Amino acid sequence: MSVPIVRSVDQLREIVAAWRREGVRIAVVPTMGVLHEGHLSLVRAALEKADRVIVTLFVNPKQFNSQADLAAYPRTEDEDAAKLAPLRAHLLYAPDAEEMYPAGFATTVSVSGVSEGLCGAFRPGHFDGVATVVAKLFLQTSADFGFFGEKDFQQVHLVRRMARDLDIPITIVACPTVREADGLALSSRNVRLSPAQRAVAPKLSSVLLKTAEWLGRGSPVLPTLAESRAAILAAGYREVEYLELREEADLHPMTSLDRPARLLAAAWLGGTRLIDNVRLFRIGSTD
Ligand code: PAF
């Protein structure tokens, strides 16, 4: 059975209002399409938690840093709908840009603190675009639960903060990163890698895991991160934008591993920017 598709806020609201009359719990899984197993794992988790699951598909122009990147972003709605059908997601909400941002649209949701640094430092305006569209999706769907992947760890913090600050009654559920067998985090951007780049790509996750192990055993943070940056470059990545240790709970920078932490990285492989992160725990002493 195919998944029903709606394209307007009015249609969406009618369906959601009928569900509300039934007293069911609703989950939303926001996506920009090009669905892969990572997205599908979010849909499966959402189906376990809620009675109705809305997957949204909207390539959000406000979160792209360049027109060229936006234009190059693949649109694969038919394939995406076909992937959702066997999962029995209840609705695909796929508005166009005019529906999401009608003429005269003038509001930006900006979340300070968690959006600064890491990806925020390298992608000006990106998180304002994400916060704005996700706030709209939460309000349009009035979902009880919002499902996000931990690969975009900073984004998870951002949407949690935004929903809390705006009193949007939704629980954010963060799901683990899904990886290829060789460790590469699933991402819609992976399709852009050449075969040679694809062979190098898993080095990012393997360096992160090794670094997490060293830090967990008490290696000093800053020299270890410097060595790991060098290892990513030596593997064939063109540039490491950041490789940082941050607090798991609030993303504050850390220079010693004395609280639960995440190691987060963004690096360029040719013309493709990949991000990844791993959780880490203290095993031995810290610096
Ligand atoms: O993670 C994404 O794909 C996007 O940032 C999101 C959450 C769908 C908002 O456009």
Image (cartoon, rainbow, N blue to C red):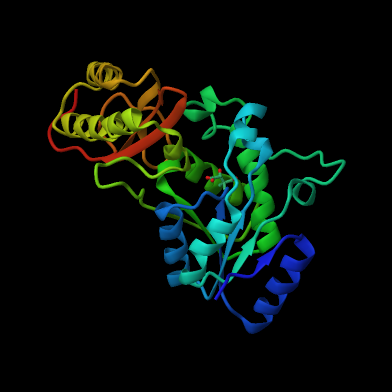
Q: Residue at x 41, y 46 (%)?
A: 150
Residue 256 to residue 155: above or below: above
The residue lying furthest to the bottom in this view is: 22
Determine the residue located farthest toward the front in the rendered image: 195
Residue at x 60% of width, y 25% of height? 124
Name of the residue lying farthest toward the right: 104
Q: Is residue 110 visible?
A: no
Q: Nearer the viewer, residue 279 or 251?
A: 279
Whether residue 194 is situated above or below residue 8 in the rendered picture: above
Residue 140 in the image: state x and y as whole percent: 70, 59
Front position in the image: 58 or 254: 58
Q: Residue at x 61, y 57 (%)?
A: 56
Residue 7 screen position, x and y as percent: 73, 60
- In the image, is residue 173 above or below residue 72? below
Locate residue 126 relative to residue 218 in the image: left or right.
Answer: right
- Can residue 279 be seen? yes
Number of marks drawn:
0
Please indicate whether residue 144 sits to the left or right of residue 20 in the image: left
Q: Quadrant of residue 196?
A: top left
Q: Quadrant of the C terminus?
A: top left
Is 128 on the left-hand or right-hand side of 265? right
Q: Quadrant of ligand 1?
A: top right
Image quadrant in which the N terminus is located: bottom right
Quarter-of-image position of residue 9: bottom right
Q: Position of residue 79 (x, y in %)?
A: 54, 57
Report x, y in % for residue 227: 23, 17
